[in-house]
Image (spheres, grey):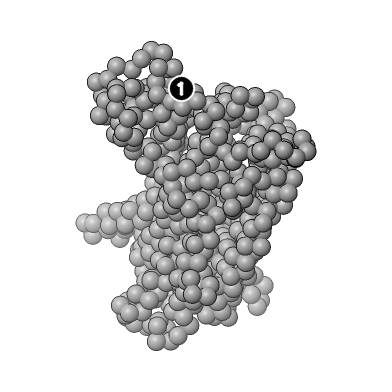
């Protein structure tokens, strides 16, 4: 922690933050002049425009791959899933760099230069420009399929055309690595854990953080999707590029107000050191008195802006890493605090595993759900057809509504009975969302059965036949997905951030993105396996390029059963989970107290 010299008015000394935050030059910062909502407003503003840019690409990507690059249902869906998986997994790299070397701010700025071309420090905007170029220049995309030509006879994209398009997508994915892992964590860093008022603000931060995300998403899923479908892909992808440039400028404007936490070493390396030391000293005797284990004093931790964590009895085999044997190598001897940090991150892994399957729903909403919409009656009045991807706007709308109701109505009401500042615990909130995921897949199954029934009644079995059934039959599954996001996604992000030790907050946030990334790759795996297995032995299969002769209802039913099994696993894991501790300040430095979460 940066040391504040004993000079100046006493009120100034009290006004310095107590959580180790500093300015960009490493100097202590005044609470009244930095951080809090005034700093978060710029971070939230960045996220609005950045989400507009990201979902301007992601929401309608499956339609572009199908209609412009002439890919089939499984291939286009899997390409979207794989790209989304890469986008969400790259933050692991960003978190490592931030926690180990550069800090969150500098990592974010550098990653933004990869995401966006700014003068000579560039690759990201090149990614956005390259994407705009790929959809604009006729020679970089295959010609449109002539009317009446069978889909299998449409000209396919050449290796060069596909290469340029997917290169652009994956350059963007690389650029997001340093932004996604650090932007939300940096926002939470603007609130001092040691000041009760700021601490209370932090409880609502992630709710309003997601609120801002979905404002940008709503714009993309309505206006930008309409532009892409009805005006042109060049303009439709050019506007997100402009939005991305605006987002970076908004973030940089707030630089003087930001609070920063100094990097405290690679969290992954620290965890590996604990496991290696424990294994190498497997036969060592662990003393019964935790005070005999290796650790530093509270004052040493306080001086360096870190929290001393008391010994706990969980995962006791890791205590061997802090057992003194005469060797002082960091790969042979670790502090109790380092061991406890590793325990905290390890304890969250079972919860992380149970959030992977629900993350596949995020992919379904931007792939198969949208593909269903292309077969339905999209008319809204005599002159307007709803773009299928616009249905994802209802996820955003219901997410926004549910966040407001949850934060302003549900939490104050339930808090009277639970006495929990959050109303319910983070895992209880997550569990409610997992139940909603089961309901969503059952709802999607029923809607698909109705769609297929109407198709059979009207003898509509062609791939491009429009079924006389309103596209709004899909509205319930999109609306429920929005409500579920309020519980699952916000609870995940808050849980992984809150339960991560102070020096591993970015890595904790990366657990959130990792669940989305692994969920995306799991979606690719499940869809490919199901499509392949169900077409064996002469069967038509559940997932075909022609959805009017497919059986997506069976696939959704299969996913609902998996979701039920996953929920039961979550309940088992959550019941045995012990929350970490809250940090409070006392006269002698920093101490850890039992949490109420």
Closer to the camera in the image, 320 or 486: 320
Closer to the camera in the image, 161 or 528: 161
Q: Is residue 208 left or right of residue 63?
A: right
Q: Is residue 258 left or right of residue 69?
A: right
Q: Residue at x 74, y 45 (%)?
A: 32
Q: Residue at x 45, y 57 (%)?
A: 177
Q: Residue at x 38, y 12 (%)?
A: 288
**What element does badge 1 sit on?**
loop
Q: State the image quarter where residue 279 is shown.
A: top left
Note whether residue 244 is visible. yes
Quarter of the image for the N terminus: give it: top right
The outermost residue toward the left is 537
User: Crowding near pointer 1: few (<14 within 10 Å), some, many (20+)?
Assistant: some
Establish if 545 lies above or below 365.
below
Find residue 507 and report its horizontal and vertical position in percent.
Answer: 46, 44
Q: State the image quarter where residue 266 is shown.
A: top left
Note whether residue 534 is visible. no
The outermost residue toward the top is 288
The outermost residue toward the front is 7
Quarter of the image for the C terminus: give it: top right
Find residue 297 and report its horizontal and vertical position in percent.
Answer: 50, 25
Find residue 140 and report its horizontal and vertical position in percent.
Answer: 40, 83
Q: How many numbered discs sit on the rendered protein?
A: 1
Residue to which mark 1 is pinned: 311
Q: Residue at x 38, y 71 (%)?
A: 167
Establish if 391 lies above or below 516.
below
Establish if 236 lies above or below 62.
below
Find residue 434 and report its horizontal and vertical position in percent.
Answer: 51, 40
Q: Is residue 50 left or right of residue 513?
A: right
């Amino acid at each position: 922690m940066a040391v504040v010299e004993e000079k100046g008015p006493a009120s100034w000394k009290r006004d310095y933050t107590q959580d180790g935050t500093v300015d960009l030059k490493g100097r202590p910062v005044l609470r009244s002049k930095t951080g809090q909502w005034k700093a978060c407003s710029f971070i939230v503003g960045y996220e609005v425009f950045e989400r507009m840019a990201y979902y301007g690409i992601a929401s309608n990507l499956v339609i572009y791959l199908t209609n412009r690059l002439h890919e089939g249902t499984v291939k286009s869906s899997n390409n979207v899933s794989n790209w989304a998986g890469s986008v969400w997994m790259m933050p692991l790299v960003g978190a490592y760099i931030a926690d180990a070397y550069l800090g969150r701010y500098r990592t974010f700025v550098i990653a933004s230069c990869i995401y966006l071309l700014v003068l000579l420090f560039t690759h990201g905007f090149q990614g956005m420009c390259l994407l705009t170029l790929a959809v604009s220049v006729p020679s970089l995309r295959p010609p449109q399929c002539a009317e009446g030509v069978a889909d299998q006879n449409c000209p396919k994209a050449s290796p060069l055309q596909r290469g340029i398009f997917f290169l652009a997508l994956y350059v963007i994915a690389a650029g997001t690595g340093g932004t996604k892992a650090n932007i939300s964590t940096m926002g939470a860093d603007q609130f001092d854990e040691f000041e009760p008022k700021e601490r209370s603000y932090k409880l609502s931060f992630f709710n309003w953080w997601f609120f801002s995300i979905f404002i940008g998403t709503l714009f993309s899923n309505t206006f930008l999707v309409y532009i892409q479908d009805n005006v042109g892909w060049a303009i439709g992808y050019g506007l997100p590029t402009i939005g991305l440039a605006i987002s970076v400028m908004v973030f940089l404007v707030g630089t003087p107000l930001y609070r920063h936490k100094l990097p405290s070493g690679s969290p992954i390396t620290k965890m590996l050191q604990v496991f290696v030391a424990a294994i190498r000293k497997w036969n060592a005797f662990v003393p019964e008195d935790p005070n005999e284990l290796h650790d530093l004093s509270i004052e040493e931790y306080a001086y360096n802006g870190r929290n001393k964590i008391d010994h706990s009895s969980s995962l006791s085999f890791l205590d061997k890493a802090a057992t003194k044997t005469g060797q002082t190598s960091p790969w042979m001897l670790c502090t109790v605090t380092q061991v406890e940090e590793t325990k905290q991150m390890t304890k969250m892994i079972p919860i992380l595993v149970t959030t992977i399957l629900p993350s596949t729903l995020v992919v379904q909403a931007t792939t198969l759900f949208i593909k269903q919409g292309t077969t339905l009656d999209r008319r809204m009045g005599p002159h307007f057809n709803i773009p299928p991807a616009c249905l994802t706007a209802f996820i955003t709308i219901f997410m926004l509504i549910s966040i407001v109701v949850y934060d302003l109505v549900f939490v104050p009401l339930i808090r009277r009975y639970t006495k929990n500042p959050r109303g319910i615990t983070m895992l209880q909130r997550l569990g409610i969302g997992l139940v909603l995921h089961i309901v969503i897949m059952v709802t999607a199954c029923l809607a698909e059965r109705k769609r297929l029934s109407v198709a059979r009644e009207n003898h509509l079995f062609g791939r491009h036949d429009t079924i006389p059934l309103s596209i709004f039959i899909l509205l319930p599954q999109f609306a429920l997905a929005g409500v579920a996001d309020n519980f699952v996604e916000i609870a995940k992000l808050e849980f992984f951030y809150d339960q991560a030790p102070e020096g591993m907050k970015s890595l904790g946030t990366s657990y959130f993105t990792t669940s989305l990334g692994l969920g995306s790759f799991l979606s690719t795996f499940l869809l490919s396996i199901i499509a392949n297995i169900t077409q064996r032995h002469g069967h038509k299969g559940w997932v075909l390029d022609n959805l009017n002769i497919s059986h997506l209802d069976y696939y959704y039913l299969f996913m609902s059963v998996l979701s039920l099994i996953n929920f039961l696993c979550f309940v088992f894991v959550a019941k045995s989970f012990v929350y970490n501790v809250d940090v409070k300040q006392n006269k002698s430095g920093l101490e850890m107290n039992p949490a109420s979460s």
